[in-house]
Image (tube, grey):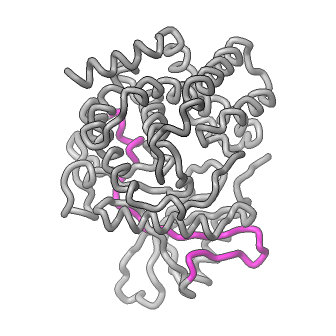
């Protein structure tokens, strides 16, 4: 079978962690991933074996050719900044030699270690939570995150990734990938190309004027950690000093940190919520999220008009990149996660004028 993910077994992972980190491994669980290998490890430190304290860590393994030390340094600085600002997020763990990564002896792979945030992914309990309350709180959280990240210098982030289809402005990449996908219907191809054309015409012509800064660039319900209990979200156990949205959401996986318009990240979060939440009408999802967001971080009238185009292009990302990657990685169902629902949402949105979407949002936000 084809796979772009590192070809490494759990026994190999255990051997390296035992030999290099001097961990006594209790359990290793393989986690879903797009193109890396991710594991959750339960262990105890060999030198402290008398205490029998079980620890947890996340292990990410990437291809050496995809590893960039400057990029990793930028991730650490962003994580450290947010932790200093009271946010709950994962942090890098060093190896015994003091380095933040480890190259395997064959030179093919790089290991990285991350702290574990106690809790569950938002996705695992999304259907159990009061969706409207969640949307308001999550909007507030992302708004606070963007306000905080405005203090981070853009220069710490490495250059743009012009070939990355998950970067919203790289819409031309989606067109190229769409051509390569086998079995795409004419209806789907036409709607996707029309969506991308509208995005280029309405959004990219205004790109230079959009407020930009450092963004996480991959906020979704698998990268948000929560403490679900008694039918609602509680404060995460690891930080009882904070109140409100900062205390309820933990953020992981800073691998895609980028300098981008804040509007694009808002669009990506709303896109994911539209795909995953089933008990709130699609247009209301955006409205409730934006209500929470704009209480902290304002959005201009122009940005609000452009937002529907960004969301729809984000849906195209799910459809095109997901299908393209699945044809390259037929052993990895994770690559298609959300693609079918994204197509359903995109079809529904095409029957609504984008100006009407923005007006609907404004009415609910001002009610």
Q: Is residue 127 visible?
A: yes
Q: Is residue 100 magenta?
A: yes
Residue drawn 66% across and 66% down? 68
Q: Which residues are magenta?
A: 99-127
The residue furthest top is 351
The quadrant the C terminus occupies is: top left
Residue drawn 46% across and 74% down? 43
Q: Is 183 on the left-hand or right-hand side of 25?
A: right
Q: Is 322 on the left-hand or right-hand side of 282?
A: right
Q: Is 363 on the left-hand or right-hand side of 283?
A: left
Compared to residue 235, the image places residue 129 above or below, namely: above
* Horizontal and vertical percent position of residue 98: 54, 85
* Horizontal and vertical percent position of residue 53: 36, 79
Compared to residue 159, the image places residue 219 above or below, namely: above
- Judge by depth and name the residue closer to the eye, 148 or 25: 148
* Horizontal and vertical percent position of residue 33: 59, 50
């Amino acid at each position: 079978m084809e796979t772009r993910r590192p070809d490494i077994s759990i026994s190999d992972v255990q051997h390296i962690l035992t030999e290099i980190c001097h961990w006594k491994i209790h359990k290793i669980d393989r986690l879903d991933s797009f193109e890396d290998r991710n594991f959750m490890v339960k262990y105890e430190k060999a030198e402290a074996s008398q205490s029998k304290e079980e620890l947890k860590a996340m292990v990410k393994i990437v291809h050496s050719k995809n590893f960039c030390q400057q990029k990793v340094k930028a991730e650490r600085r962003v994580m450290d900044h947010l932790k200093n600002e009271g946010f709950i997020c994962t942090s890098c763990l060093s190896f015994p030699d003091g380095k933040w990564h480890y190259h395997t002896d064959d030179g093919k792979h790089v290991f990285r270690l991350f702290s574990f945030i106690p809790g569950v992914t938002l996705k695992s309990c999304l259907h159990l939570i009061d969706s409207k309350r969640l949307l308001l709180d999550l909007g507030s959280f992302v708004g606070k995150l963007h306000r905080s990240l405005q203090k981070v210098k853009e220069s710490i982030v490495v250059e743009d990734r012009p070939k990355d289809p998950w970067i919203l402005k790289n819409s031309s990449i989606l067109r190229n990938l769409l051509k390569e996908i086998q079995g795409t219907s004419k209806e789907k191809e036409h709607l996707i190309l029309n969506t991308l054309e509208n995005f280029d015409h309405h959004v990219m012509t205004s790109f230079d004027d959009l407020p930009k800064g450092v963004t996480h660039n991959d906020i979704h319900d698998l990268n948000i950690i929560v403490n679900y209990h008694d039918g609602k979200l509680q404060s995460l156990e690891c930080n009882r000093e904070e109140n409100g949205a900062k205390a309820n959401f933990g953020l992981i996986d800073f691998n895609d940190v980028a300098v981008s318009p804040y509007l694009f990240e808002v669009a990506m979060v709303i896109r994911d919520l539209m795909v995953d939440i089933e008990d709130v009408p699609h247009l209301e999802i955006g409205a409730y999220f934006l209500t929470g967001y704009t209480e902290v971080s304002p959005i201009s009238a122009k940005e609000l008009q452009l937002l529907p185009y960004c969301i729809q292009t984000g849906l195209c990302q799910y459809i095109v990149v997901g299908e393209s990657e699945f044809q390259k990685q037929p052993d990895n169902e994770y690559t298609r996660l959300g693609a079918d629902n994204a197509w359903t949402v995109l079809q529904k949105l095409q029957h609504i004028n984008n100006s009407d979407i923005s007006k609907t949002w404004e009415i609910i936000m001002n009610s």
